[in-house]
Image (cartoon, rainbow, N blue to C red):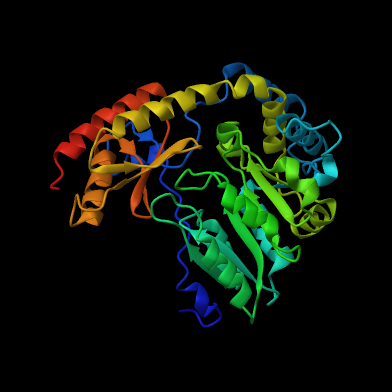
Amino acid sequence: MLPFLRKDLVELAAYKPHLGIGVASSISSTPTQSDKLDTNESPYDLPAELKEKLAWTYKELIETNRYPDGGHSLLKQAIAEYVNDSANLSSNVFISNNISLGNGSDELIRSILIATCLGGNGSVLDAQPTFSMYGILAQALGIPVVTVPRNPENFEMDLEAASTAIETTQEQPVRTVFVVHPNSPTGNCLTAAELTWLRSLPEHILVVIDEAYFEFSQMSLAAELSQHPNWVILRTFSKGFRLAAMRVGYSIAHPELIAILEKVRLPYNLPSFSIAAALIAIQNRSLLLESVSQTLSERSKLIETLSQYPELQISDSAANFIFLRFKPGFDNQTNNALKSLHLALKKSGTLVRETCGGLRITVGSPSENDRTLNRFQTAFKNLEL
């Protein structure tokens, strides 16, 4: 180890981006064309007319020798309008100073950690399994992470353990709590009990509510933000808006918190092309979000078909993915069977994510899902259970 590097980072498990289709096709035994159902992206590209509009914008309006709009003024206004509209709020509830933009939600998470816990000012709490970047970014910044479990059956947070952790963590008390609504990789939304608990947390604890999959769940806590200045909501253009390649995320919060996030984010953090793409997407949201209903229908098809396997436990999902596990008692070596199933799907051409003792399968297009179900049937027949 190089002597100037932090020793604690040697043990840190980095987030491992999954291989793109072009790269995955070079893997031995993997078909040239793979169905990429491992990263919760939309299976649908931008419509041709919007790509043409974006190309025109790049050609006619974007000067590549100039820095982007560092304040994101037009995009913030458009997002505020969308948030108000999607939450059935009056048009002036959220305005530009309630919005901060990041290079994906990851940058916003990092900014939140810098603003709340960095420098020995506190620790973060999350409930596993959940999105791994909360813990990874916190540890990379030298911030302690307090982890509590979830109910293994329905993945609800262990609220008693969470409350105890907050009460007993003394040296660096919990300053920030991360929750996902709905959770990844399990797909479950916050329950009434969890919401009651979040509402009861004192104002010196920041509550981060990640609504990355809002366009699929249509469940949001945005209407409650005015009552809770210690809450912040995160959203992204990567899922329902089909812009994963552009890396645009946004936060919604009290203006005082937003002002601090604006201070700690990197200057010119969004390229001009990403800003233009997000503006075009949100201005054409009725067209883009038409695909959500088909994704929900396909999700139901996947759940219904895979639920016919008595060995499997399929979780309810409010997102654009499903999570499945082997039921206890069906396999003495479940982990090996899971790995075998994951590898068989990969070799036959369906990329899914093995995580947290199960498989997370992104809902693809109808043809992708049909191929996945056929490959799943073949792979399952060859398992030794």
Please tell me which residue lies in front, 56 or 286. 286
Please tell me which residue lies in front, 152 or 333. 152
Residue at image location 57% in from the left, 59% down from the top: 134
Q: Inspect this view and state whether residue 180 appears.
A: no
Measuring from the top left, give residue 323's x and y in whole percent.
Answer: 39, 43
Q: Inspect this view and state whether residue 303 appears.
A: yes
Please tell me which residue lies in front, 95 or 3. 95
Please tell me which residue lies in front, 183 or 96. 183
Instruction: Say above or below: 324 vs 266.
Output: above
Please state, as top left, top right, bottom left or bottom right, where the N terminus lies in the image: bottom left
Q: Left of 94 or right of it: where is 173?
A: left
Measuring from the top left, give residue 238's x and y in whole percent.
Answer: 58, 38
Residue most extreme to the right: 92
Instruction: Say above or below: 147 vs 289.
Output: below
Measuring from the top left, give residue 142's x and y in whole percent.
Answer: 60, 73
Residue most extreme to the top: 49
Q: Residue 288: which quarter of the image?
A: top right
Q: Left of 32 or right of it: where is 148?
A: right
Q: How many marks?
A: 0
Measuring from the top left, give residue 84's x and y in whole percent.
Answer: 77, 33
Q: Left of 304 or right of it: where is 75?
A: right
Residue at image location 45% in from the left, 65% down from the top: 13
